[in-house]
Image (cartoon, rainbow, N blue to C red):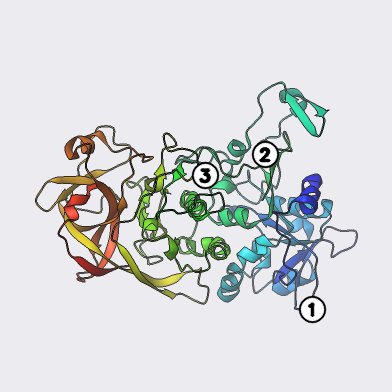
Amino acid sequence: MSTWIQDCVKNHQGCSKPEKSFMPTRLLDVQAVRGSRDTKLVTLTGHDVISSYVALSHCWGPPSKRPMITTAANLAINRRRISFYDLSLTFKDAVKLTIDLGERYLWIDSLCIVQDDPDDWLHEAGKMSAVYGNAVFTLSALSSSDSTQGCRVANPRAITHERRFFDFDSGPYRIRVFEKEIMKWHQEYGDDTYRHGEHGPNPLRGRAWTLQERELSTRNIFFSQNLVLWECKEAKGSSELPWHQVKPLDDFRPWSMRNVLGEGVLPDGPVALRDRWYELMEDYMSRHLTQGSDKLPALGGLAQNFQKKLPSSDYLAGIWTEHLPQALLWRMTDASNAQRSTTYRAPSFSFLSLDGPMSYESQMLTNYGVGDRWEDDRRDFASTDLEFLSSSIELNGVDRFGAIRRASLAFRGRMLQVRLKLRDEEEDNVHQWNVLDTSDGSMSGAFFPDVGGEFLADTPAWCIAARPEPEESYIPIPYLISERLGPDAALVMGLALQRDDGNVDIFRRVGLIRWMKRSAFYGVKLTKFAMV
């Protein structure tokens, strides 16, 4: 572990250095008591200069196994001394590792934030981007479901017996040869091919809060089921294969569509940046939260960090205005089990208003027949005449990336009245689509509801077209629709909307529309409307 850290700090230009001007409000001093592993909370002021600190990412677990926390009642006590023996196993391991790796200060959320002080919690939650981003490294208890299981490998393999290997040098390279197949990094961590499913036996991987903890940290040390894993901005490694290098982009991810003609598709260009945000949101929505009210705050640090890459874009509950209207074309992948929040936390056009896995697969292309990923011969897909006009948001506090009271988007476009059928038309309907009929009863496309069971038969709705359908869509057009609409029909994708409490020009999103005839919008007048 120390070799990974030292090599990264010394040689990796892409791994950011901590900001000298930032330090967390509180830290644990793990060397506070000479000759003891007892710690204490230190509260930093503007005059304090501390060179570095370590952060911990962990699962709290159920109430019966919750770790020690700092409250208003014990804050003064924790400033004087915290007994090592009163700490949970995960915290003990974190303290020992911090000392063993040559660091003095440790940040743990449950101890460094006053948990029963709402103002302190909101203030510190708004600093997560800086807390994890400026830690010299983050210890992640990946395989532990609660604080009693430790910051350690759950099922360590006897590599000398099960994964025997031989190292030898070949010029400037070191080669490691294994007798048996080694464990792949992304599978051991819980990142698998582009799919929607569980994340394997690593509980931390499934918690929503820990996504930004991983993404914001410059360096991560993960204690997984079988291996110790390393990840920084330039490289990955494991206790079996320490030198595995990060690829610029995971090979298993489908390719993204352009939003406008000539949009750059280079690795650091707008398409790759947008696709990265989509990928993160898919990951986030597949994870779990104990408190639904944390849906936006648990993402706030990541959004705050991403804003640096999109300085001219406004952020509204997981949606960047620079990516509109295509950013609205997400789909709940398990609508039958998706749930809409009973209390307001996000507008209907945001997936954060829902619970359940989500995908931007509508914006993905099959990797076949399109050309090289970074070449300009990738197809351009121009937008429809749906025009984004403005946005508005009312915050629930001062953090512009945290909880909100309301938000809306204003557009100009063509709205077509449709009927949302509630019958499946194919026996093997893995994507849970329903029939979309126009008001005259003719079949016009497929409707993917955000939440199954929300509608009665023949529910009236309005449809807007957001962009043309690509020929090489990652999700192919269902045979039934292709057969009825014809092979040469010009098709579009968009949203299904319903009026908000009877308001004439204010609408709520209820689902995604795919493979709708573009000709259905011919003759429909442009109109202004808002989504809430």
Q: Are marks 1 and 3 in contact (CB under 8 Å)?
A: no
Question: Along the horizontal axis of the image, is 261 left or right of 53?
Answer: left
| Residue lying farthest to the right in this orientation | 35
Element on which disc 1 rests = loop
Amino acid at the residue labelled 1 = His
Residue 307 at what x, y percent from top left?
54, 65
Give coordinates of residue 292: x percent, y percent: 45, 60
Number of the front mark, 1 or 3: 3
Say whether residue 128 is left or right of residue 364: right
Circle 2 crowding by C-alpha within 10 Å: few under 14, some 14–19, many from 20 = some
State if disc 1 and disc 2 touch (CB < 8 Å).
no
Total marks drawn? 3
- What number is the disc on residue 154? 2
Q: Is residue 166 above or below residue 460?
A: above
Q: Which mark is residue 374?
A: 3
Q: Secondary structure at mark 3?
A: loop
Q: Quadrant of the N terminus?
A: top right
Per the model, the C-alpha gap separating discs 1 and 3 is 48 Å
Image point 58% across, 69% down: which residue? 126
Q: Earlier in the sequence, mark 2 or mark 1?
A: 1
Which quadrant is home to the C terminus?
bottom left
Front position in the image: 112 or 9: 9
Q: Which mark is residue 47?
A: 1
